[in-house]
Amino acid sequence: MIYIGSHVSLKGDEMYLGSVEEALSYDANAFMVYTGAPQNTKRRPLEEMKIKEAKALMKENNILLSNVIVHAPYIMNLANPDKVKRDFAVEFLTSEIKRTHEMGASQIVLHPGSAVGSTREQAIKWISEGLNEVIKNTKGLTVKIALETMAGKGNEIGRTFEELRDIINLIEDKTRVSVCFDTCHTHDSGYDVRNNFKGVIEEFDKVVGKEYISVFHINDSKNVRGSRKDRHENLGFGHIGFDSLIKIIYDEDFLSIPKILESPYVEGNPPYKEEIMMIKSKKFNPNLKEIIVNKT
């Protein structure tokens, strides 16, 4: 059995309950969500989130809390040279992890940070220091911080497995950190996930340890390998390809790990129900985009 889902919204009066309902409408048994708007710090009180109702609906439909993923907002940079901004990142990530815990999600995916105005080595040290502080602030919680593999655009940290390893090596409580393996990002950063996923995983295992992988972002890429651009494409329409992504999704070493789609909307319409259908049938539909547009 695979655990497959997508990024879903959290908004309006239904909040977390609405997120579960959206996931179910795609025939998903996993999903990823923000705890609030990713571009600001505004957050609804937990008592307004409809957490109890959401958990009940998940239980009713056999969605395990271990397959619910939270994505951290992009407004934090643990590698910012400005200590005030680094302190803000620590404080806000701490609060996000506490909200993630209350929602029952097992992990929060985090873009490690960006080396703005400093060396990559210094950025890695600051990221690790910040994560150690966040973990201490949330002592007793089991939420994992899943560091995402990055495409390498700009000064992103995490574009190589070695950079993720160097961060993890500096973490005091390694039970609280893991890795989110993004197929588009890894391809765009230069790894050949299209033709040699097994070889890429062997390299990851030697450098980091494949036991650290706790979630996959399944995305095709609009770009050639090594472009460092991070532009997602719908499954089968990009440079990775449907067959290669299916092999990754169904890889026997990672069957129990949730797979999350972050494919772009097609003319404003979510593609996830149709993409999940293709994944379950293991058959690519070249008319996917036309079907999505015409169904509305």
Image (spheres, rainbow, N blue to C red):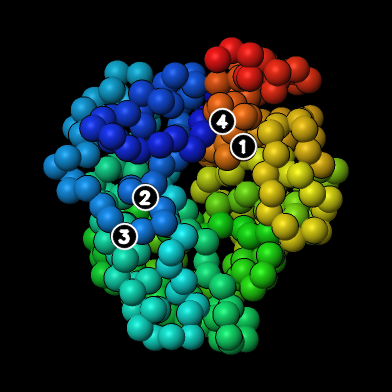
Q: Amino acid at mark 3?
A: Thr
User: Disc 1 on helix, strand or loop?
Assistant: loop
- In this view, the residue in front, 169 or 263, is 263
Disc ID at residue 37: 2
Percent coordinates x, y for residue 273 in the rendering: 55, 21
Q: Quadrant of the N terminus?
A: top right
User: Disc 4 on helix, strand or loop?
Assistant: loop
Query: Farthest residue in the left direction?
Result: 47
Position of 142 relative to 208 (above/below): above
Sequence-wise first label, 4 or 2: 2
Q: CA distance from mark 2 to mark 3?
A: 7 Å
Q: Amino acid at mark 2?
A: Ala
The crowding category of the residue bearing disc 4, from other C-alpha atoms within 10 Å (few below 14, some 14 to 19, many at least 20), is few
Percent coordinates x, y for residue 82 in the rendering: 43, 85
Which marked residue is nearer to the observer: mark 4 or mark 2?
4
The crowding category of the residue bearing disc 1, from other C-alpha atoms within 10 Å (few below 14, some 14 to 19, many at least 20), is many
Position of 95 relative to 17 (above/below): below
Q: CA distance from mark 1 to mark 4?
A: 12 Å
Is there any visible trace of residue 244 in the rendered image? Answer: no
Left/right placement of residue 53 relative to residue 267 reads left
Instruction: From the image, tell me which residue sits under label 4.
Output: 268
Percent coordinates x, y for residue 41 in the rendering: 31, 60
The residue at 33%/48% (across/down) is 36
The residue at 84%/50% (across/down) is 224
